[in-house]
Amino acid sequence: MLVIDARESDSIDKALKKYKKKFERAGILRELRSRKHFTKPSVERRAEVLKAAYKQKKYGNL
């Protein structure tokens, strides 16, 4: 559960913006989508390795 400290002087828009930012940082939606279907651990590792290789190729020679 996300708790937002909203002061009396803050508007609803500011409080909503804080909530959205905290929600995004917590990764709740990302986790919910990943839990919708099961992926085998070997597939997850393979995707992780491919992602790391892509990052190394793209940003490695800086």
Image: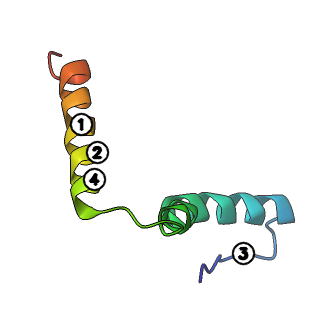
Find out whether the residues at labels 2 and 3 contact each other: C-beta distance under 8 Å.
no
Q: Does label 1 or label 3 sit earlier along the sequence?
A: 3
Label 4 crowding class (10 Å Cα cut-off): few <14, some 14-19, many 20+?
Answer: few
Q: Please give left or right for residue 2 compared with residue 56 in the image.
A: right
User: Residue 21 is drawn in which quadrant?
Assistant: bottom right
Q: Which residue is mark 4?
A: 43
The amino acid type of the residue labelled 3 equals: Ala
| Residue 53 x %, y % | 19, 31
Residue 23 vertical placement versus 58 (above, below): below
Q: Which residue is mark 2?
A: 47
Find out whether the residues at labels 2 and 4 contact each other: C-beta distance under 8 Å.
yes
Label 3 crowding class (10 Å Cα cut-off): few <14, some 14-19, many 20+?
Answer: some
* Element at label 2: helix
The amino acid type of the residue labelled 4 equals: Val
- Quote the CA–CA distance across marks 4 and 1: 11 Å
Q: Which residue is mark 3?
A: 6
- Quote the CA–CA distance across marks 2 and 3: 40 Å
User: Residue 54 is drawn in which quadrant?
Assistant: top left
Q: Viewer-nearest of labels 2 and 3? A: 2
- Quote the CA–CA distance across marks 1 and 3: 42 Å
- Quote the CA–CA distance across marks 3 and 4: 42 Å
Q: Please give left or right for residue 6 compared with residue 52 in the image.
A: right
* Element at label 1: helix
Q: Which residue is mark 1?
A: 50
Q: Nearer the viewer, residue 47 or 18?
A: 47
Residue at (57% x, 58% y) in the render: 24
Q: Does label 2 or label 3 sit earlier along the sequence?
A: 3
